[in-house]
Image (cartoon, rainbow, N blue to C red):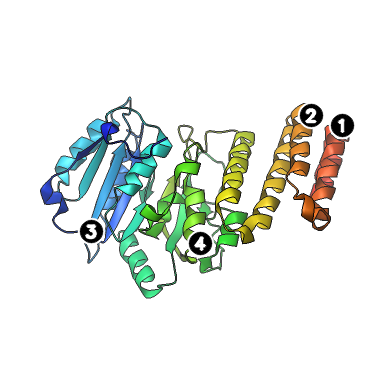
Amino acid sequence: MKVLNPACLVDVSSRADRRERPKVSVAMVAYRHEQFIEQAVESVMLQETVFPYELLIGEDCSPDRTREIVLRLKRKYQDRIRLLLREKNVGMMTNFVQTLKACQGQYVALLEGDDYWTDPHKLQKQVDLLEARADYSACFTLTRVLGDNCSSEPLYIPARHTKTDAFATEDLLQKNSIATASVMYRNIMAQINFTPFLFLKMIDWPLHVLVSLRGPIGYIPEEMACYRQHVGGLWTGWEETARLSEMIKCYCILKQVMPSKYTRRISERIIKTHQLMALELLRGGDRRQARHRVFQSFVAIPPASVFSFGWFIKRSLMLSLGAFGMPLARVEAAMRR
């Protein structure tokens, strides 16, 4: 699959748009975002900076009014918006990668068309940090989660009590603590091979991991963005088993492309994710599929290191007992130990 296909891409910009190279390119993908896209774009246009920045919107032939809205916003902010209009639908992953590859700035910030920023100084603060810390490959901020939940306490990514000021590759392999709406990278997109990831349903997490190989990712513990969780969202609209399955696919690709020193850590994550999926299937009463996932968790153990994976083996054995009839409460209790 080709990432860039000029036949599927119309760059709606003028020479006047390109006179001054932007310091920051904001990459925004949009598809069926008519309810949210205007707020997302306006939150970018409200940014106060001492440097020029651009907003690239990759619009993927939405069946709703998304394209109509971004064309109107392009007329309003002629010199700061570039539209990459697909002549036919290319899909989320290709649209995302094409938009990234078209970024001209020294830095690249991400904002999907259904999220928005809440701090008008977000871009300035992030550039200031990256220019002060040459060792950082990227940085991100605290992000509020907006969703249909009944919690009286607001949710954040990462957790609001997070004390770490930078995240290494090992941290991001353990858990994705970076909201897409909050991140800014140094523009190394041309150096990244996206091809192995094009068949995934997510790209932000593996991209964070790959960028982190070039240096820690700094964290600014200030709320600057909002991430919407809604039924139309690709990730949040999935069942838990579908999300876990996609995570396993992602880990398997990362295992192939990353340096060998990360092989053990990724293997651990693959095993644990199979185990979590088996437990979720047991909760849903599907013992047959749970047995399959337990089997896959054993298969994922490196043969040469089997004796050092004792903790994982014990968990898989307990799950296998559950898959063959042990009461779920006993399995869950054993898994918490």
What secondary structure is marked by label 1?
loop
Mark 3 vs 4, N-terminal side? 3
The CA distance from mark 2 to mark 3 is: 55 Å
The residue wearing badge 4 is 213
Q: Is residue 131 above or below residue 284?
A: below
The residue wearing badge 2 is 287
In this view, the residue in front, 233 or 96, is 96
Give yes or no for contact between labels 1 and 2 (Cβ–Cβ under 8 Å). Answer: yes
What secondary structure is marked by label 3?
loop
What secondary structure is marked by label 4?
loop
The CA distance from mark 1 to mark 3 is: 60 Å
Query: Which amino acid type corresponds to the residue marked 2 in the rendered image?
Result: Arg
Q: Position of residue 258 (x, y in %)?
A: 56, 55
Mark 1 vs 2, N-terminal side? 2
| Left or right: residue 330 compared with residue 117 | right
Query: Which amino acid type corresponds to the residue marked 1 in the rendered image?
Result: Phe
Q: Is residue 214 visible?
A: yes
Query: Which amino acid type corresponds to the residue marked 4 in the rendered image?
Result: Leu
The CA distance from mark 4 to mark 1 is: 42 Å
Picture quadrant where residue 122 is located? bottom left
Q: Is residue 211 above or below residue 201?
A: below
